[in-house]
Amino acid sequence: MLRGRLLSVISARQMAMFGPEFKEPHFRKSELEELQKTGEISKIGHIPFKAAPSAATVSPLYDPLLEKFTNYVMRKGEKQLARDLMAKTLQSVKRIQVQKYNAAQTEEEKAEIEINAMKIFHKAVENCKPLLTLTPVKKGGATYQVPINITAEKASFTSMNWLIEAAKSPPKDARFYNKLAHELINAAAGTGKVIKRKQELHKQCEANRAYAHYRWG
């Protein structure tokens, strides 16, 4: 059984288009400029690189965080639908903020209103990232919820997942992209359902700090 698995892994590696000596490609302009600036580009001229994936793009409009968020929104492989939903979400964010800007009475009020939808999106995701999380640990026949530090990748995933869940919550008669737009705006301002959810998680971690030493058990 084990031998069969090993043979299948070896055969898969042999059939791979690129061997282990091939490195991941640098296809974005910002990455290439950084390599040129640091002088690293002269050191990798002899290194073989993999071909860029079919989904890769050098468009200045490409945003890695937005692409990842879109993948989390996607269901049943319907990538175009997920992209359309995100485009409508950002349009809704822009429209709401422009309406606030036009309704502002003073220049000071207008200066405080952010109308860049992408900046609001990034700030919302950042504000919703938890610093701690709870993990179950069994000790002496009992299970304790132990607070632990959360990795940056897990915090980012949790933040985006919470935002999507909040947009899917009732009322069901509202459009997903409209609810997501309001959640992003609220989260960017430090308010809303997701911010409250993060704060509640932190309170639970604080309440369970007596079990923190179990993480090393």
Image (spheres, helix red, strand yellow):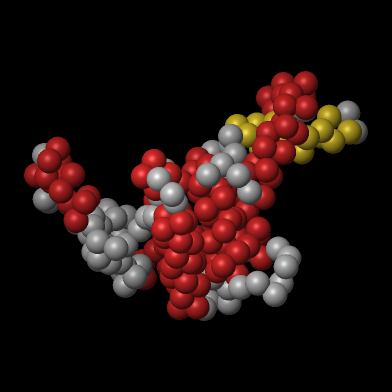
What's the residue at 68%, 34% (across, down)? Answer: 202
How many labels were placed on the picture?
Answer: 0
Relative to residue 186, is residue 137 drawn left or right? right
Instruction: Name the quadrant of the C terminus.
Output: top right
Instruction: Name the quadrant of the N terminus.
Output: bottom right
Q: Is residue 127 above or below residue 165?
A: above
Measured as percent of width and height from the top left, residue 45 is found at 11, 50
Relative to residue 210, is residue 107 drawn left or right? left
Measured as percent of width and height from the top left, residue 28 is found at 23, 57
Relative to residue 23, is residue 138 drawn left or right? right
What's the residue at 50%, 72% (across, down)? Answer: 85
| Near-viewer residue (169 or 162) | 169
| Near-viewer residue (204 or 182) | 182
Q: Quadrant of residue 35?
A: top left
| Near-viewer residue (119 or 210) | 119
| Near-viewer residue (150 or 141) | 150
